[in-house]
């Protein structure tokens, strides 16, 4: 039997076991659905454009609706993961996703589709801080940076799945195929909901809530051994108010967690959502001059770029313990700017393959760097009592950036042209780089340890005699 003197330290110092991996996968599948939905709407947008012929601003709203909804979901619903617990919100968000996916496919007008996708985005936004809290609170400190990075890599896997499903439906040459694309999200969401029914509640959250017996049982399952508690009885830890994020104690961490995430998502989502449209407009892949031929070739190009996303995440998982989170974030922003420069140069020259190469450099850099590192920073910067609130605010800031990028991309492209639009996006990435460099010392001591992935001492786990 193990004697436990601290739930938090015991979980930080323990070794990975089967329950850890189950929790990791089931929580990370929510990120998979974010990637799937985002890229399925990217595949659906050209069909919706042909189906309803919306103005550029309305097309941007269709694309941005889910990310705008994610702002509300992250900032508002994410807060409930601190109040109700991680498990309850994890189940709620995936239930919402499954139901609203079907409703998306039944949309009867542009306005209805925008409203429905806003609600779907709320589910996505709330799932981000919930999933991040699960991974950050259950995983040992030594493996935490890699596993947080790996959990976000499910976004790229979802993107590949979304692009592949989109190609399958586009081959039907039916403009109504966009309805089936959007409604198909019900199937993986239902499967994930069933799997998440097996998730335990976080012992850290249970301990803070004064539910120590329940926390003890989960910890015993996690350690695969009976445990004996040697912890002084204390009053439940009061959940800090949302306003605490802007107090003197936390405001530096809040800025560091939110601003770079905003900047990376302006660039990432703004570029990614319209990648098929941009590639189609440049005649990528020597497509014939028909809508269906251009769209299929562009989606194939986007699928290859999505595979580069996976490569970027793989590089990030390998590098995170070797180079460190902050160095990777700085290098990633720099690589994004270089890739965007190639896209702008290719646009100015009318060179479709140079544009494709620029997208590849951009996708590799963003996912080996700030797309993953901002997710890690937000997950470890705040204590348990306000973790989901702080992480939710940071993810909401990211979705605000995503909404700005998605909504303004078609408008800027129509008014400024592709080259100058890319220059504007590069300036946003430069802002993220500058904030990272200038505010990197805002990290508090606990997150420095977690970001380096160092093994904690095991004083919280001692033998208590025979079981």
Image: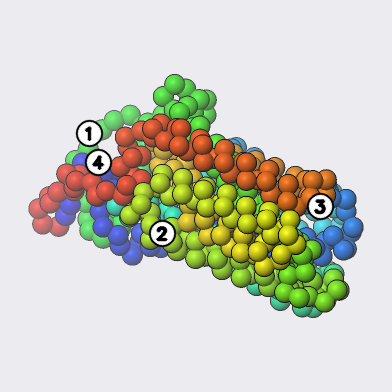
- Between disc 1 and disc 3, the foreground one is 3
Tell which residue pokes out farthest to the front in this image: 349
Task: Report the front residue among 442 and 4.
Answer: 442
Asked whether disc 3 touches disc 2, contact meaning CB atoms under 8 Å apart, the reply is no
- Between disc 1 and disc 2, the foreground one is 2
Q: Specify the quadrant that holds the C terminus.
A: bottom left
State the SS at label 2.
helix
Task: Report the front residue among 146 and 10.
Answer: 146
Density class for disc 3 (Cα within 10 Å; few <14, some 14-19, many ≥20) is many
Q: Is residue 392 left or right of residue 223?
A: right
Q: How far, Cα to Cα, is label 2 from label 4?
A: 29 Å
State the SS at label 4.
loop
N-terminal of the pair, mark 1 or mark 2, is 1
Residue located at (35% from left, 52% from top)? 323
Asked whether disc 3 touches disc 4, contact meaning CB atoms under 8 Å apart, the reply is no
Q: Please tell me the numbered disc located at residue 6.
A: 4
N-terminal of the pair, mark 4 or mark 1, is 4
Q: In the figure, 53 relative to 122: above or below?
A: below
| Residue bearing mark 1 | 232
Q: Is residue 439 left or right of residue 291?
A: left
The x, y position of residue 202, in whole percent, is 39, 48
Density class for disc 4 (Cα within 10 Å; few <14, some 14-19, many ≥20) is some
Residue located at (83% from left, 61% from top)? 48
Residue located at (46% from left, 49% from top)? 331
Q: Is residue 298 visible?
A: yes
- Between disc 3 and disc 4, the foreground one is 3
| Residue bearing mark 3 | 59
| Residue bearing mark 2 | 317
């Amino acid at each position: 039997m193990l004697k436990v003197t601290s739930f938090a330290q015991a979980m930080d110092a323990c070794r990975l076991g089967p329950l850890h991996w189950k929790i990791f996968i089931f929580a990370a599948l929510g990120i998979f659905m974010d990637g799937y939905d985002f890229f399925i709407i990217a595949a659906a947008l050209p069909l919706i454009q042909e189906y309803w012929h919306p103005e550029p601003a309305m097309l941007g709203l269709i694309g941005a609706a889910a990310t705008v909804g994610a702002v509300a979901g992250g900032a508002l619903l994410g807060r409930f993961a601190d109040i109700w617990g991680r498990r309850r919100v994890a189940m709620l968000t995936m239930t919402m996703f499954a139901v609203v996916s079907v409703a998306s496919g039944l949309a009867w007008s542009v306005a209805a589709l925008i409203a429905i996708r806003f609600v779907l985005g709320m589910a996505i936004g709330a799932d981000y801080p919930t999933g991040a809290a699960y991974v950050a609170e259950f995983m040992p400190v030594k493996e935490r940076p890699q596993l947080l990075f790996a959990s976000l890599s499910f976004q790229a896997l979802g993107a590949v799945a979304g692009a592949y499903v989109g190609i399958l439906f586009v081959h039907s040459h039916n403009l109504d195929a966009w309805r089936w694309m959007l409604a198909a999200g019900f199937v993986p969401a239902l499967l994930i909901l069933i799997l998440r029914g097996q998730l335990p509640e976080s012992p850290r959250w249970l301990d803070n809530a004064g539910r120590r017996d329940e926390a003890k049982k989960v910890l015993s399952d996690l350690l695969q051994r009976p445990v004996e508690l040697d912890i002084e009885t204390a009053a439940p830890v009061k959940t800090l108010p949302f306003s605490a994020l802007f107090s003197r104690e936390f405001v530096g961490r809040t800025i560091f967690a939110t601003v770079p995430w905003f900047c990376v998502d302006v660039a990432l989502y703004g570029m990614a959502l319209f990648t098929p449209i941009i590639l189609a407009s440049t005649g990528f892949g020597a497509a014939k001059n028909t809508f269906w031929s251009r769209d299929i070739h562009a989606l194939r190009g986007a699928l290859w770029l999505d595979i580069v996303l996976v490569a970027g995440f793989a590089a990030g998982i390998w590098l995170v313990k070797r180079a460190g989170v902050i160095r990777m974030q700085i290098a990633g922003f720099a690589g994004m700017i270089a890739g965007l420069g190639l896209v702008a140069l290719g646009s100015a020259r009318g060179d479709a393959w140079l544009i494709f190469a620029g997208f590849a450099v951009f996708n590799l850099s963003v996912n080996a760097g700030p797309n993953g590192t901002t997710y890690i920073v937000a997950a470890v910067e705040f204590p348990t009592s306000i973790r989901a609130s702080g992480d939710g605010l940071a993810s909401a800031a990211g979705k605000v950036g995503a909404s700005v990028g998605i909504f303004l991309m078609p408008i800027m492209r129509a008014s400024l042209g592709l080259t100058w639009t890319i220059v504007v996006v590069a300036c946003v990435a430069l802002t993220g780089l500058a904030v990272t460099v200038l505010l990197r010392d805002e990290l508090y001591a606990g997150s420095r340890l977690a970001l380096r992935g160092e093994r904690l001492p095991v004083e919280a786990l001692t033998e208590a005699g025979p079981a």
